[in-house]
Amino acid sequence: MTRANGILLVVAIAVLLVPISVARAADAEFEAVARHFESTYNVRRNEPKASWFANVAMRLVQPKGVKTLRIATFENLNGPVTDPRLGEVVRNSLDKTWKAVVRETSRVDRDQTFVYVRQAGDSLEVLIVSVDIEEATVIKARVDPKAAGSWLEYLDS
């Protein structure tokens, strides 16, 4: 590899990785909820191995209107079956622009689900937190609102 090609490769990698690191730094909501699970249940998050590559690909291709996607799963939760503070933790990690769409706790299984949305420029951001007795999932996505509308129309038919 020539020196010029090496420099070009380093610049290309930097161009691809800088938006990802900036996006992660600006993703305080996702991180706050994920850290809550890590500290409360003494577990580590499982994020898909190539999630950084998937986000770069989504920025370029935007499949079905998805612009960014972050997923963290937590398995084998070691702690209370239900966390009465979870709703408060999720709410406190969000600013006033987020609106609650779903806040549900199952009376039988004690499963908890929270869905929040907000307008972010020309996009719609969605934060989903779902917990059952053994595992939890945190998802944050930025989608095209027109695509989201077409998904709802498809589900309604």
Image (spheres, rainbow, N blue to C red):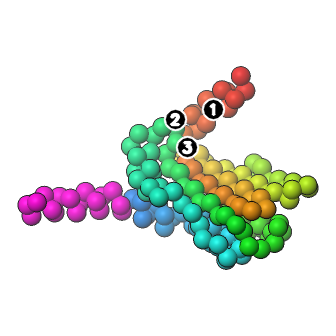
The residue carrying pointer 1 sits among few (fewer than 14), some (14 to 19) or many (20 or more) residues within 10 Å by Cα, namely few
Residue depicted at x 80% and y 54%: 103
* Image quadrant in which the N terminus is located: bottom left
Q: Callout 3 environment at 10 Å: few (<14), some (14 to 19), or many (20+)? A: many
Crowdedness of circle 2 by 10 Å Cα count: few (<14), some, many (20+)? some
Q: Amino acid at mark 2?
A: Lys
Q: Quick one: label 1 or label 2, which is nearer the N terminus? A: 2
Which quarter of the image is occupied by the C terminus? top right
In the image, residue 122 above or below residue 105: above
Mark nearer the N terminus (1 vs 3): 3
Name the kind of residue labelled 1 in the image: Trp
Lateral position of residue 144 relative to residue 100, left or right: left
Q: Position of residue 117 (x, y in %)?
A: 66, 50
Give me the C-alpha separation between circle 1 and circle 2: 9 Å
Residue 67 visible from this viewpoint: yes
The residue where tag 2 is placed is 64
Residue at figure coordinates x 65%, y 72% from the top left: 43
Is residue 84 rendered to the left or right of residue 60?
A: right
Q: Note whether residue 95 is visible.
A: no
Q: CA distance from mark 1 to mark 3?
A: 11 Å
Q: Determine which residue is flagged by label 3.
A: 143
Q: Which residue is mark 1?
A: 151
The first of marks 2 and 3 along the sequence is 2
Q: Residue at x 40, y 46 (%)?
A: 57
Furthest toward the front, the residue is 76
Q: Is residue 7 magenta?
A: yes
Q: Does residue 29 belong to the magenta stretch?
A: no
Task: Pick the residue in front: 82 or 28.
Answer: 82
